[in-house]
Amino acid sequence: MSGPREDDQPLLSVRGLGKRYGDRVGCRDVSFDVWPGEVLAIVGESGSGKTTLLNCISTRLEPTTGAVRYRLRDGQERDLYEMSEAERRLLMRTDWGFVHQNPADGLRMSVSAGANVGERLMAVGQRHYGNIRGTAANWLERVEIAEDRIDDRPRDFSGGMRQRLQIARNLVTGPRLVFMDEPTGGLDVSVQARLLDLVRGLVADLGLAAIVVTHDLAVARLLSHRMIVMKDGAVIEAGLTDRVLDDPQAPYTQLLVSSILQV
Amino acid sequence: MYVAVKGGEAAIANAHRLLGDRRRGNRDLPSITLDQLVGQLSLAVDRVMAEASLYAPHLAALAVKQARGDMIEAIFLLRAYRTTLPRFGASLPVETGEMVAERRVSATFKDLPGGQVLGPTFDYTHRLLDPELAGDGEVDAALVSETDGDPLMRVTDILAHEDIIESSRGAAGDTPLPEEPSGDLTREPLEFPMQRDQRLQALARGDEGFLLSLGYSTQRGYGRTHPFVGEIRMGEVEVELDVPELGFAVSLGTIKVTECQMVTQFAGSAKAPPQFTRGYGLVFGQSERKAMSMALVDRALRADEFGEDRLAPAQDEEFVISHSDNVQATGFVEHLKLPHYVDFQAELDLVRRMRGEFEAREAADLETDNASREAAE
Amino acid sequence: MTGQAQDIAGGMAAYNFAYLDEQTKRMIRRAILKGIAIPGYQVPFASREMPMPYGWGTGGVQVTASIIGRDDTLKVIDQGADDTTNAVSIRAFFQKVADVAVTTRTREASVIQTRHRIPEEPLTASQVLVYQVPIPEPLRFLEPRETETRKMHALEEYGLMHVKLYEDIARHGHIATTYAYPVLVDDRYVMDPSPTPKFDNPKMDMCEALQLFGAGREKRIYAIPPYTRVVSLDFEDHPFEVQRFEEPCALCAARDVYLDEVILDDKGGRMFVCSDTDHCEERRAAGHRGHLAAEEAYATTEAAQ
């Protein structure tokens, strides 16, 4: 696996981010950068604040404190929460992707696979049915869904197929950053392995940056270049994935690593 | 040879004439009077006033008579009249604490100052048809006792005194009501999300049956609020109008209302102490069912305020308010009987075309099959 | 009249010209002006209870009542015809409450209230077309929530609209929407043209007349000012098409008009006649004859009027 690319500026910068729910802390004082083409894993057990963090940096949940800055395609760096809602929503459907743990949350279940993939193209103004369908067919192939399923609805798909369809739907507009929330969460082990292979291949081919939330250290090991470990809403360790997993520094990380079978 | 059907005007006029005839019924019997309706079908008149939001017993009775007893039609008639009335101003909030109560019950306390007053209720009647009522028999006069005339303390005020129920004036405690008048959805555009004042107005005008079903659904677990009837009271309250020229409020008279204060599920956080919450219902006339349903739905719709998950239909403001108005609902359901033949023609044309394409495809497939069979032979 | 009945009749308020009070008319006119200023945008307004049921044209009636003056000539059509019962009823309402001149001739009308059709004869700059609208929100059946659809309009997020058209083509080979066909107004707002057949959509584009839309139950008013671009949504390779009828009107021989199918017997006998009854009559008066219009049938129709 190649390391992060040498690029002079980070794509996404998180500084001093915190989220409180009344008196309860969702996450606190989180800072990190994500560089173009880099995959960052956020690991921790459930309740550690990793999903809150993911939602805060993907504009799905407004943080209480801190800033999230993103570098747009034109090189301009903007604070996400100072952008207008229109700008944020445009960003979400063009330059970003969001892969939900449950594919039903990210797909239109009553609309055909082709339209699920084509929706983002139509949203950015493509108006040629044949081209939209052609692109959709091409993406279905890339995520290993047979082309003759293009007019079928996700309802008729297996869990693994749905998740692959969700990934195609997100990648069709060529985003630069994809958020993934436990992308292999609800899948059988054998299906998980196939999906991880697919995601790894796509991320490398497309030069995507990705932020993957997972409780599964094996997923982090396979996909990510760097990782951060969270506990009780705070980052307790960060570093290159291989370093963190092979030589964990924080006692909690050591506990996490030793509690699973070595991969 | 074809002649287009004409004469819609004559047909409509004749239909209305027939309606008038059927409404009147047997001419040998006297026509029912509005006083009879107001006096003897008073709960029907009350419902029409409540859902038409116009307190006018004789006009409501006229509407009931004109509608041949169809309640929604009567509500519609009275509303269409109400909408043409000029607005002189808004009354002061009625003081239900000062009510001359004909009925007052609480389910939360066994006894309380002023006592439980059953009043004219169907509760505890045995629902046996009474043949006596078929005739014109004598009815015993009601027994009335003198009261001391002191207003009955509200149960929610007792709880409020102990500070264990949310203030009725918002979270900020006892700050006075804002100066601005309450919203009026018959005058201002309705927009979601709504303020509670407009929402309560919508519920007060809402269909009794619809709100009853929604309130019932919360009891069965679809948006449960753990309700207790803090108090139901029914009786006359005074309506006062502030007249700036005079510098004091003038009494316009009294109206009969039913009020229900539902004491519901407590909520609290580190900042707000644990306390009971409220659902509120107030309707014109005597209608406990409506006031109670309204209070249940009001509380269910406040889910967001208390950080409750909005999952049940009764908690969904857009769903509840958009569909609670029976005059709107009946209009749109019944509009389906208006002619739609232009749209239907468009659909007919498309279905025929698609059918043609389908059959052509089938025929082509069959031909290919035959051709390949022949080639194989 | 009994004493009580007199009291009630005497105590009831008299109705204003065109039924609505002037305050209400001003409120509705403000909404109309806002609608004209933002073509295709749905302006919320405090719709009044009208003396006819919601869903039966209360939005159109409120718009007409707010713009009509004593010198106007009103035409009311439903399904293209002046003699359908609801059109008759609405026309009678305005005769009663506003005492305005009425007509069935498209050309003579200054205000035309319509349900489900646009007249065949091109409208002029001196006319206003008022549409009755049941569901004003073109996105409603894709997204039921008002709070969400308003946001989609505000942010011009219309991708979902094309998803529906895409699905039609994928499933049926062509766009299967035949009426209430969505349009893009002035290159900004996606709008529901009310349940007119898509046959009428091209008439909205660069129309000389002012077009006003009233939805009473849903409490929305919107507008297309004269000479505004109105484009029916489509795909480049599946362009918008209107319905075509194979035969001409059986009474006036008109082609390129919208036809109603009339069942003649229970053995599959049917004929096609103009949906726009005024257009058909004018043509027949000008001497056009379809294959089922005998001289005498025409005379009978005239006599019946």
Image (tube, helix red, strand yellow):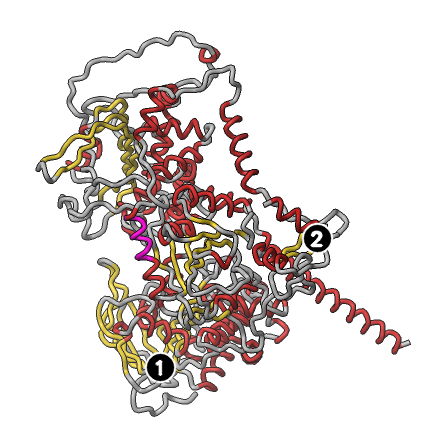
Visible residue check, residue C2: yes
Name the subunit of mark 1: A
Name the subunit of mark 2: C
Would you say residue B246 sits in the magenta stretch? no
Pick whichever, B244 or A253, lies toward us. B244
Residue B332: mark: none
Q: Is residue A61 left or right of residue B371?
A: left
In the image, residue B114 lies at what x, y percent? 20, 22
Report the magenta stretch's main SS.
Answer: helix
- What is the CA distance from the residue labelled 1 to the residue labelled 2? 89 Å
Which image quadrant is residue A228 in?
bottom left
Residue C295: mark: 2
Farthest residue toward the top? B138
Badge 1 marks a residue whose secondary structure is: strand
Pick whichever, B162 or A184, lies toward us. B162
| Residue wearing tag 1 | A226
Q: Residue at x 44, y 67 (%)?
A: C208
Looking at the rendered structure, whether the residues under marks 1 and 2 are on a common chain is answered as no
User: Is residue A121 placed above or below B2 in the rendered structure?
Assistant: below
In the image, residue A119 lies at what x, y percent? 49, 72
Residue type at tag 1: Arg
In the image, residue C219 lies at what x, y percent? 38, 52
Badge 2 marks a residue whose secondary structure is: helix
Residue type at tag 2: Glu
- Residue range highlighted in magenta: C23-31
